[in-house]
Image (cartoon, rainbow, N blue to C red):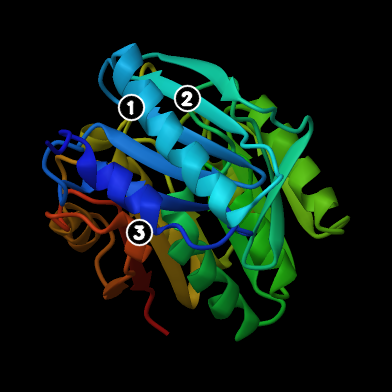
């Protein structure tokens, strides 16, 4: 008899090599695998992260762990399995080490860049894997515009900034309320040998735009806010306040990368906001998400949209 999470076990059985870059291996959250909606499996080499968004019995967890151990023994004989399990919901997460160990410090690679991650604490781990194609786009976009000035709002640990600087940006200004996240962002730059050109501003953008606006105009503005952060940002009401700033921030012909990770709000919400709040700034394209993050409903998945200011 197959188990409700058989698709996860099947995905584990298909792993045929040791991952080198950080990446998602199984995305039950996309709704393509009935019975597996609660499960995700990520590689943060040399560790694996198994996540459930619902409570899990000890027996079910042991079954998944045994399947991963068996596959790991086949593709990496003699190497220990390092496995972290996280159970999370909308407001909290509990995390534990199931097997092996996690490096401390722990950094992972993606597309030629390295980033610090922390699997054993917090709900987020320092690098959002679903944004890999957004980072790829930024790298290619800036490489075609060497010396570009970039504004990275809600910068978190500054992964966008790292790839922009690697691609030849002249300057990146990273803004985030969380000084701790920006501190990791600084470490990410040093990890990649980037010692100048990036600045880090711990700032609530809604308290004052003066310093940010005076630093412009920018050839690229990145906005990647949380969908909901109590007391600071609610996408439904606050995203419009961001978008209406775009005409003052963007250089002529400049681009904006607007990101929205909400299962309830589709891409048309962003398009309509730009039409209403920043007339003249045109929609260019929606970036595809990494293949591993395919969703039965694209409107529910991460939205990463590119817009362009008039020349």
Left or right of 20, for residue 64: left
Left or right of 222, for residue 306: left
Q: Secondary structure at mark 2?
A: strand
Q: Which residue is mark 2?
A: 85
Query: Foreground residue, 97 or 178?
Result: 97
Q: Mark 2, residues whose alpha carbon is within 10 Å: few (<14), some, or many (≥20)? A: many
Query: Foreground residue, 53 or 206?
Result: 53
Say if mark 3 contacts mark 2, CB within 8 Å: no
Rendered location of residue 219, percent (x, y)? 55, 71
Q: Which residue is mark 1?
A: 52
Rendered location of residue 84, percent (x, y)? 54, 27
Q: Separation of disc 1 and disc 2 at Cα?
A: 8 Å
Residue 69 drawn above or below residue 245: above
Q: Mark 3, residues whose alpha carbon is within 10 Å: few (<14), some, or many (≥20)? A: some
Residue at 20 percent of width and 38 percent of height: 36
Q: Which residue is mark 3?
A: 292
Among the two numbered marks 3 and 2 on one chain, the one whose residue lies closer to the N terminus: 2
Residue 301 drawn above or below residue 50: below
Say if mark 1 contacts mark 2, CB within 8 Å: yes
Left or right of 232, for residue 286: left
Query: Foreground residue, 17 or 42?
Result: 17
Residue at 14 percent of width and 36 percent of height: 35
């Amino acid at each position: 008899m197959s188990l409700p999470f058989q698709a996860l076990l099947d995905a584990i059985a298909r792993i045929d090599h040791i991952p080198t870059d950080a990446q998602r291996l199984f995305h039950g959250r996309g709704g393509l695998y009935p019975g597996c909606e609660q499960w995700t499996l990520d590689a943060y080499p040399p560790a694996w992260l198994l996540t459930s968004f619902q409570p899990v019995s000890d027996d079910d967890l042991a079954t998944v762990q045994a399947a991963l151990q068996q596959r790991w023994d086949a593709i990496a004989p003699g190497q220990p399995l390092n496995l972290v399990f996280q159970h999370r919901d909308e407001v909290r997460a509990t995390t534990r080490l199931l097997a092996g160990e996690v490096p401390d410090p722990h950094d992972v690679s993606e597309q030629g860049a390295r980033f610090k991650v922390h699997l054993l604490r917090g709900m987020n781990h320092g690098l959002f894997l679903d944004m890999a194609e957004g980072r790829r786009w930024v790298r290619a976009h800036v490489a075609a515009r060497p010396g570009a000035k970039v504004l990275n709002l809600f910068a978190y640990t500054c992964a966008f900034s790292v790839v922009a600087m690697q691609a030849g940006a002249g300057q990146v200004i990273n803004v985030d309320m969380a000084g701790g996240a920006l501190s990791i962002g600084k470490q990410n730059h040093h990890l990649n040998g980037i010692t100048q050109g990036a600045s880090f501003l711990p700032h609530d953008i809604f308290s004052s735009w003066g310093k940010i606006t005076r630093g412009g105009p920018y050839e690229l503005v990145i906005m990647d806010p949380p969908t909901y952060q109590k007391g600071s940002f609610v996408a439904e009401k606050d995203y419009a306040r961001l978008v209406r700033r775009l005409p003052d921030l963007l250089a002529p012909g400049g681009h904006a990368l607007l990101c929205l990770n909400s299962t309830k709000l589709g891409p048309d919400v962003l398009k309509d906001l730009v039409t209403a709040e920043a007339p003249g700034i045109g929609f260019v394209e929606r970036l595809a998400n990494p293949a591993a993050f395919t969703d039965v409903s694209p409107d529910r998945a991460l939205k990463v949209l590119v817009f362009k200011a008039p020349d």
